[in-house]
Amino acid sequence: MNETIGAIVIGIGVAFDVLGCIGLVRLPDIYNRLQAATKCVTLGTCMILVGVAISAGWDAQPLAIKSLLCAVFILLTSPVGAHALARGAYRSGVALCKTSVVDEYAESRTLARYQAQAAATPTDQESDHAKAETA
Amino acid sequence: MIGIPAVILFALVLCAFLCLYRIGRGPSAPDRAMGIDILGTLIVAFTALTGLHTGRDWYLSIALAWALISFIGAIALAKNLEGRAYDE
């Protein structure tokens, strides 16, 4: 019984892995590829590990506990690594694909730069206001 | 000791070859770093299945260590791509 449930979970996980890797090859730019590959492969590998734990059952305790620990660890670290990679790719100047419609990170970065400039030079604006008032 | 169907192993090997395609072909350096990261996750899955097949629990220790080192490698590559030093 345990082995049947475990085999079904492992099969679903492998299907997710295959779909994620097809997305890794087919999608147009790195951000889309990270989107597809990270989410699908993380979920697929976690399901494989949970399936291994279910198949091993209570008779093989070290195997099941280590497998669940590994699943939790991958679930925590894989999105962090993908996020850092996407940020590094953007900062190193990899362009978005041509069919992208919005780039909110660039907008927020230009906004932050403008605000930093405005905060760094308040005296000029104040002197401008003072000139305008005197004139 | 539990048998693993050959279809599952073939599917995982196919995934690994797709990752290798992306590592070899990838137009930019972050593509290759991403391919290495995903390949590490796949290797963790493969090692866990091997542990289930043979019934030896130290294969799962290898999987845990591999996940850790893959994560640290991804973070280090991302920082390097961003143009910062490793200790910043």
Image (tube, coloured by chain):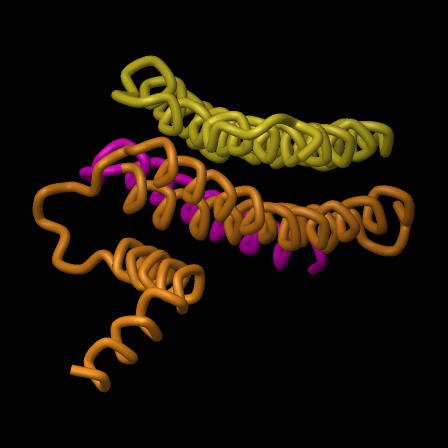
Chain colours: A orange, B yellow
Q: Is residue B6 visible?
A: no
| Coordinates of residue A59 in the picture (x, y in percent) | 90, 50
Q: Residue at x 46, y 23 (%)?
A: B13
Q: Which residues are magenta?
A: A1-29
Q: Main secondary structure of the magenta part?
A: helix
Quadrant in which the N terminus of chain B is drawn: top right
In magenta stretch: residue B61: no
| Coordinates of residue A40 in the picture (x, y in percent) | 43, 50
Toward which corner of the image does residue B32 lie, by quadrant?
A: top left
* Viewer-closest of A134 and B43: A134
Q: Residue at x 30, y 33 (%)?
A: A93
| Coordinates of residue B8 in the picture (x, y in percent) | 49, 35
The reply, left or right, for residue B25 in relation to residue A40 is left
In magenta stretch: residue A17: yes
* Viewer-closest of A93 and A61: A93
Specify the farthest residue to the top. B24
Q: Residue at x 58, y 53 (%)?
A: A47
* Viewer-closest of A22 and B7: A22
| Coordinates of residue B10 in the picture (x, y in percent) | 44, 26
The reply, left or right, for residue B20 in relation to residue B44 is left
Specify the farthest residue to the front. A134
Quadrant in which the C terminus of chain B is drawn: top right
Q: In the rendered view, would you say A1 is above or below B81?
A: below
Q: Residue at x 64, y 53 (%)?
A: A6
Q: In the rendered view, would you say A120 is above or below B27?
A: below
Q: Is residue A124 visible?
A: yes
The number of numbered discs placed on residues in the rendered structure image is: 0
